[in-house]
Image (cartoon, rainbow, N blue to C red):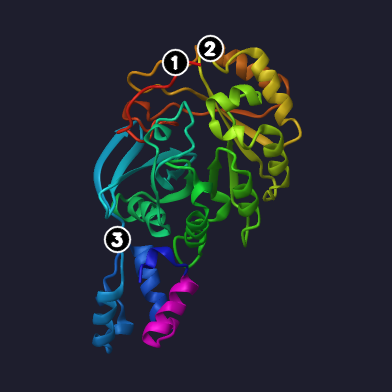
Amino acid sequence: MNILDQTHDQFAESFFQRYGKRTFYSTPVYHQVMHCGSVDLDRLSCFSRLPALAGQLRRDLVLDTGRVVAQAKDHGVVKFITRLADGLDIESVIIPMFRRFTLCVSSQVGCRMGCRFCRTGRMGLLRSLTTAEIVGQVHTARHRLGVDVRNVVFMGMGEPLDNLDNVMQAIRVLSDQRGMDIARRYITVSTVGLIGGIDRLAGMDGTPVNLAISLNAPDDTLRSRLMPVNRAMPMAPLREALLRYPLARKSAIFVEYVLIDGVNDRPEHALAVARYLAPLPVKLNLIAYNPAPGDAWKAPSTESYTRFRDRLVAEKIFVRRRGEKGGRIMAACGQLGGAAAGSPEQL
């Protein structure tokens, strides 16, 4: 039984079917793993008179979060690399934000979306993560690295909506109040714009999670060159899907715009972006491009960034500057997947 891929109720049902014991026994086990980080059954008094059951449970219960093989720090940002059971590596990033720690989790090893500005996309897709491997990143941050993570953003390696079944189950596990207890208002799923996945996520049981869209261009022509997914799912139907998405009270759709020098940073681009977003309740995260060694593209100048931001603000778009911490350890936006080679194509 891999406990990290189950909610409390699912684990309780599995426990009963396997051992014939009710929640008097299964709930303490679930709490011990999710809240305390271990499967030390000796601490649970309910098993003191049932050594045979305790022994069987030790053999059956799986708690494998992978092996942390590297860590790096930059101004409070921590990137850790986890080696999975099959030898593949994933990267996760802990970010201190507003008195809370946010964990940026990966949902795949690599990515098949092929966004030209993203280092992970140059890896291609090696495989999707299981629910337990996604939840395991939060478990590692909390119980192995000692960080009280309270926000989770699916903005690491991979396209979350390309692994939607496991991502949705991970959300259920992470938000279970008897487990990780991360409220869904503190969980954000970021996507390049897979419309079918957005609609499925909208129909998920329970409180909706936050939605973030990687936009990065003012029109279909440029967006298709930067993000190949736009050829199949262009901006007009994407906006219709965003209009359908159920938002929690006083919430908004987060829009991510990576500003690249000489590519998508002109004032007329800002005006077109503002007009596209006008019907939507949005908060736009404006991100200066984070170059990797050997990249042909550059971050925008301070003047260019400021002009772009000011034009959006003048058009009544709420804009936030995304911090640049983590760039020195390849932990910033678009930099995960350090083993990837090559550089962006010239546009």
Considering the numbered disc 3 on the image, is that residue within a helix, a strand or a loop?
loop
Span shown in magenta: 8-23
Please name the residue that numbered disc 2 is placed on. Answer: 262
Q: Earlier in the sequence, mark 3 or mark 2?
A: 3
Q: Amino acid at mark 1?
A: Lys
Residue 110 occupies quadrant: top left
Crowding at dot 1, Cα within 10 Å, few <14 / some 14-19 / many 20+, comes out as some
Q: Position of residue 78 (x, y in %)?
A: 34, 38
Q: Nearer the viewer, mark 3 or mark 2?
A: 2
Crowding at dot 2, Cα within 10 Å, few <14 / some 14-19 / many 20+, comes out as some
- 208 in relation to 1, above or below: above
Q: Position of residue 346 (x, y in %)?
A: 46, 16
Residue 36 occupies quadrant: bottom left
Considering the numbered disc 1 on the image, is that residue within a helix, a strand or a loop?
loop
Q: Amino acid at mark 3?
A: Asp
- Residue at left offset 50%, top offset 60%: 169
Please name the residue that numbered disc 3 is placed on. Answer: 64
Crowding at dot 3, Cα within 10 Å, few <14 / some 14-19 / many 20+, comes out as some
Residue 50 occupies quadrant: bottom left
Please name the residue that numbered disc 1 is placed on. Answer: 298
Quadrant of the frame with the N terminus: bottom left
- 295 in relation to 32, above or below: above
- Tell me whether circle 2 and circle 1 mark residues in contact (CB < 8 Å): yes
Determine the main secondary structure of the stretch shown in magenta: helix
